[in-house]
């Protein structure tokens, strides 16, 4: 069974959204979980509907900062993206903008991540695995992604088995 993965982010992708996709693809391959990945902008109708379904809007750290009055030094954020202070170790083969992610970038935006829910914002990157929103607002760890993928694969297999029994 193929596990459906959706990543809601920016278009073009920011380093956090791009590295999230890289992590999911690598962990799925390592875990031998077949996946289909759909990347979508937070501005698409589908992403907006996903947010509305849980009573939230989907937005970026900038949206959260504005809505929740979180002070962020955006110039410092851009400097971190342009020249990552430490190498990322979550993705073995980052492509393009994904190579610009660093732990310091997530740390700079953590106040927004922490304020997002109270502000009614589902903050990008949003990771949906097997139809369940499993993470938002930061880059997830490889271990968490592995757990979510394996759980979704198990759920899909169980659901498939139940459907086969009903048909028999």
Image (tube, rainbow, N blue to C red):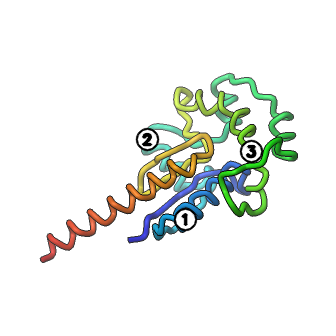
- Residue 116: x and y in percent read 58, 32
Tell me which label, 1 or 3, sits earlier in the chain.
1
- Residue 46: x and y in percent read 52, 56
- Residue 127: x and y in percent read 53, 51
Q: Which residue is identified by label 2?
A: 54
The answer to the question of whether label 2 and label 1 lie on touching residues, with beta carbons closer than 8 A, is: no
Residue drawn at 56 percent across, 48 percent down: 126
Q: Which residue is identified by label 1?
A: 37
In the displayed structure, 95 sits above or below 42; it is below
Tell me which label, 2 or 1, sits earlier in the chain.
1
Q: Viewer-proximal residue, 33 or 78?
A: 33
**Crowd rating for badge 1 (residues with CA inside 10 Å; few <14, some 14–19, many 20+):** some
Pair 1/3: label in front: 3
Q: Which residue is identified by label 3?
A: 102
In the displayed structure, 101 sits above or below 94; it is above
Report whether 107 appears left or right of 125: right
SS at badge 1: strand
SS at badge 2: loop
Mark number, residue 91: none
**Crowd rating for badge 2 (residues with CA inside 10 Å; few <14, some 14–19, many 20+):** few
Q: CA distance from mark 2 to mark 3?
A: 30 Å
SS at badge 3: loop
Tell me which label, 2 or 3, sits earlier in the chain.
2
Q: Viewer-proximal residue, 61 or 160?
A: 160
Residue drawn at 34 percent across, 60 percent down: 154
Pair 2/3: label in front: 3
Q: Viewer-proximal residue, 161 or 88?
A: 88
The answer to the question of whether label 1 and label 3 lie on touching residues, with beta carbons closer than 8 A, is: no
């Amino acid at each position: 069974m193929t596990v459906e993965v959706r990543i809601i982010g920016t278009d073009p992708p920011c380093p956090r959204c791009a590295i999230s996709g890289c992590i999911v693809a690598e962990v799925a391959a390592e875990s031998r979980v077949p996946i289909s990945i759909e990347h979508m902008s937070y501005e698409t109708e589908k992403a907006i509907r996903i947010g509305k379904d849980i009573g939230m809007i989907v937005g970026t750290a900038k949206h959260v900062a504005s809505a929740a009055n979180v002070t962020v030094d955006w110039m410092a954020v851009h400097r971190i993206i342009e020249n990552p202070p430490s190498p990322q170790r979550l993705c073995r083969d980052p492509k393009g903008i994904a190579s610009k992610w660093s732990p310091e970038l997530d740390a700079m935006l953590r106040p927004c991540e922490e304020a997002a829910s109270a502000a009614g914002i589902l903050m990008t990157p949003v990771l949906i695995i097997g139809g369940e929103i499993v993470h938002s607002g930061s880059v997830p760890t490889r271990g968490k992604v592995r757990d979510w993928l394996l759980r979704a694969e198990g759920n899909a297999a169980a659901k498939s088995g139940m459907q086969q029994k009903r048909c028999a």
